Image (cartoon, rainbow, N blue to C red):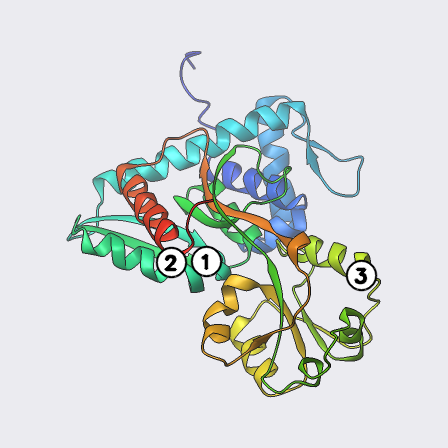
Amino acid sequence: MRGDLLDGRIKLRHLTCFLEVARLKSVSGAASMLGLSQPAASKTIQELEAILGVELFDRSRRNLVPTSFGEVFLRYAGASITALKQGMQSVTQVEGGVSFTVGALPTVSARILPAAVTHFSAQRYGMKPRIITGPNGYIISQLRLGEVDLVIGRMAEPDVMKGFSFEHLYSERIALVVRPGHPLLQPSVFDIGAIGGYQVLMPPPGSIIRPTVDRFLVANAIGPLADEIETVSDSFARSYTRSSDAVWIISEGVVVDDIDHGLLMRLPADMSDTLGPVGLTTRTDTPPSLPVQLFAQSVRAVVAERIGPR
């Protein structure tokens, strides 16, 4: 084989499996995401390491982390998958316009995204956005794999942001919300510690706001919570909170319309320490396409109009 040609032994399955193992730090987790058995995923990684002649993961730790070789290969593998998918999209455009995919956290889906799509559609570019929502880890992984072109939401933890660029649009706090008429709304002086006496709906471990919520509870000497429900379902949490005495801890953007319409009430707690940056996340190794850049302009316009300067 000529030295300037790719090694034909490296297949797409090797790259996608490698990227998922690197993201999840687990072969079993990657196997589950890719619909493979764990032995099949392990074999795929071993095949890739044999072809490259280096170890891509440090197996001496509980969680798999890329070696120095793995870190380098991660950048190129992710870029190649993204470039390939963009190339395929450029020659197989859906009838009637260009398609691109936006991944959004629920907080943005409720507060910003509908108006941004309306603004973008009004420009009549003839380009079709595809919208997906989900937990931060999922949509970031889809961005890394090239399945998503732009992510709108809270900035991820520093170790997750490797290979990504973040543009800050605004900051958002976490809210404690309850139904109208909740007993915690009655006292003239609100006691934050009193929420420990009620059922609390919490973001699960691994969600982007969970570390901030945990720090807030510790700082206010709350916990461990005696009655806690972990959920990522906004529809369940919204319905359950409105029909019970539960306290829902959630990003304010998810419930801002419910609060504005009096369907849920914000507890008068000082949540200034829970402020977190919300913005646009893109890959650093591939420039955003024109459709993505135009959609990002619509997002910025809506943020400027509805939320104001940063």
Give above or below for 58 relative to 121: above
Closer to the N terminus: mark 3 or mark 2?
A: 2
**Residue 237: percent from the left, percent from the top?**
58, 76
Distance, label 3 to label 2, CA atoms, is 33 Å
The label nearer to you, 3 versus 1, is 3
For the residue pair 4 and 113, the one nearer the viewer reads as: 113
**Residue 96: percent from the left, percent from the top?**
15, 53
Task: Please tell me how crowded label 2 is: few (under 14), some (14-19), or many (20+) other residues with Cα within 10 Å.
Answer: many
| SS category of the residue bearing label 3 | loop
Residue at 40%, 36% (x, y): give it. 82
Q: Is residue 201 left or right of residue 278?
A: right
Residue at 77%, 61% (x, y): give it. 217
Distance, label 2 to label 1, CA atoms, is 6 Å
Q: Is residue 279 left or right of residue 86?
A: right
**Quadrant of the image containing the N terminus:** top left
Name the residue carrying label 1. Answer: 108
**Residue 94: percent from the left, percent from the top?**
21, 51
Distance, label 3 to label 1, CA atoms, is 28 Å
**Residue 85: percent from the left, percent from the top?**
35, 40
Name the amino acid, label 2. Answer: Leu
| SS category of the residue bearing label 1 | helix
Name the amino acid, label 1. Answer: Val
For the residue pair 192 and 189, the one nearer the viewer reads as: 189
Q: Which mark is residue 137?
A: none
Residue at 82%, 75% (x, y): give it. 226
Task: Please tell me how crowded label 1 is: few (under 14), some (14-19), or many (20+) other residues with Cα within 10 Å.
Answer: many
Please say whether residue 147 is visible from this viewpoint: no
Q: Which mark is residue 113?
A: 2
Q: Which mark is residue 220?
A: 3
Residue at 46%, 30% (x, y): give it. 284
